Amino acid sequence: MVEALTRGRPTGVRGIAISCAIAAGWLLAQTGGAAAHSPLLSCFDNDDGTVTCEAGYSDGASSAGQTVRVREASNRLILESVFGSDGTFSFKKPEVSFVVEFIGDSSHFVSFDGEDLAK
Amino acid sequence: MTGRGRFAFVVAALLAAGGPASAHFLLLYPGDAARMPGGAIELLIAFAHPFPGAPMMELEKPPGFYVVRQRGAEAKPEKIDLTRFLQRIDFMGTDEKSAAAYRAALPRQEFRSTGDYVFVVEPAPFYEATEDKYIQQFTKTVVNIGGVPGNWDQDVHLPAEIRPLAKPYANWTGGVFSGVVLSDGKPAPFAEIEVQYMNRDPDLAAARWQGEPKVKLPHPAFETVSLRSDAAGVFTIGLPKAGWWGIAALAVGPETTFQGKRLSQDAVLWVQARDMK
């Protein structure tokens, strides 16, 4: 990429401007639309002994394939899995107090206290 | 009559014959628009003048009442018919006269998932005798549960529609809101738009407006804010007070007659502003 930028380099003020524009475009292309998104996690009591959690991001990005962990309140890991293609994950409701963790992209992290399950 | 006098007469006659629909707004009120999972959703559908709260107009059972919901940008939208939840009520106006309206209590477990819910009412044309014309207001209210966005900015392909350019459920008091007026899916340039503030909140259990008016008018012209969309159909309004703001783009739908009389197909969108605390 550096070679591409320097090959046939324009000269003078106009050349500097063009080079800056190309470099800025390259940087944007590398970083993409780095949205300032936040991870979101909600969990529901299905009233049948199971819990369903939904994860996503504040910009609508998907959580599919990203890590979900369920821990006891004492921090002991109960299970670890990934969110499905629809951003949901269901599991048997633990008989002890628990916390659900969504470990998202770029180390995004959010947890949900099992005491706050919505119906 | 002088030339100037004839002009004034013609303008007055035109306004009387085909003027704006006197700030009628079809309400599609869900309580709070930005919600957390688990709360029950109950909606009020009524035909009203939301600033004064009267008169209420008789609302025929809407033939179209549905939600299009979507969780996340990559998910597919899901359309759910809601007409089975419509329950007729008599809603009392501030003039102590009631009119037929509808409430819809949605099952908590079916409507708890996070994402955007675009609620839509497609009413039958309403005959407004004082104007000898029909009014049909295609109305949208967007609710979000849990913060994950979805289809708030997507069209639902109504004959008359407002496409939000900002989330209708996440607006701070004092901010602005923009949208695009659409006629049959295409931007409507210079469309006539009316905006009214809902000056009292509805009490669904009591089927009437509750509390005292939130705002006192400094002048009659402030009851209905009037503006037009620009050449691209875009408009921007301010939201100077927390609460619900109704936006109606008048006579932008393609059909202009119904049962031999004039028809105004309007697009209505409800936007909620909330205070920074």
Image: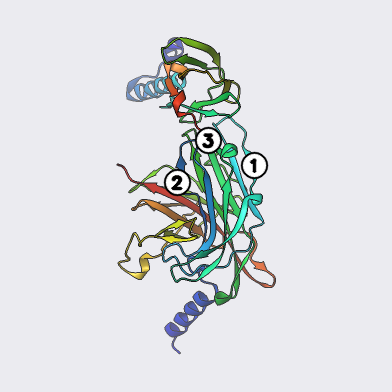
Q: How far apart are marks 1 and 3 (CA)?
A: 13 Å
Categorize mark 3 by other alpha carbons within 10 Å: few (<14), some (14-19), many (20+): many
Categorize mark 1 by other alpha carbons within 10 Å: few (<14), some (14-19), many (20+): some
Q: Which amino acid does label 3 sit on?
A: Gly
Q: Position of residue B232 (x, y in %)?
A: 50, 51
Q: Which amino acid does label 1 sit on?
A: Lys
Q: Position of residue B23 (x, y in %)?
A: 48, 66
- Upstream in sequence: badge 1 or badge 3: 1
| The label number, if any, that marks residue A8 in the structure image | none
Q: How far apart are marks 2 and 1 (CA)?
A: 21 Å
Does residue B218 appear left or right of residue B75 in this picture? left
Q: Position of residue B101 (x, y in %)?
A: 56, 61
Disc 2 marks which residue?
Answer: B32
- Upstream in sequence: badge 2 or badge 3: 2
Disc 3 marks which residue?
Answer: B115
Q: Mark 2 lies on which chain?
A: B
Choose between A119 and B35: the one closer to the eye. Answer: A119
Q: What residue type is labelled 2?
A: Asp
Frontmost of labels 2 and 3 is 2
Frontmost of labels 2 and 1 is 2
User: B121 above or below A63?
Assistant: below
Does residue B120 appear left or right of residue A107 in this picture? right
Q: Can marks 2 and 3 be said to lie on one chain?
A: yes
Q: Distance between the residues labelled 2 and 3?
A: 15 Å
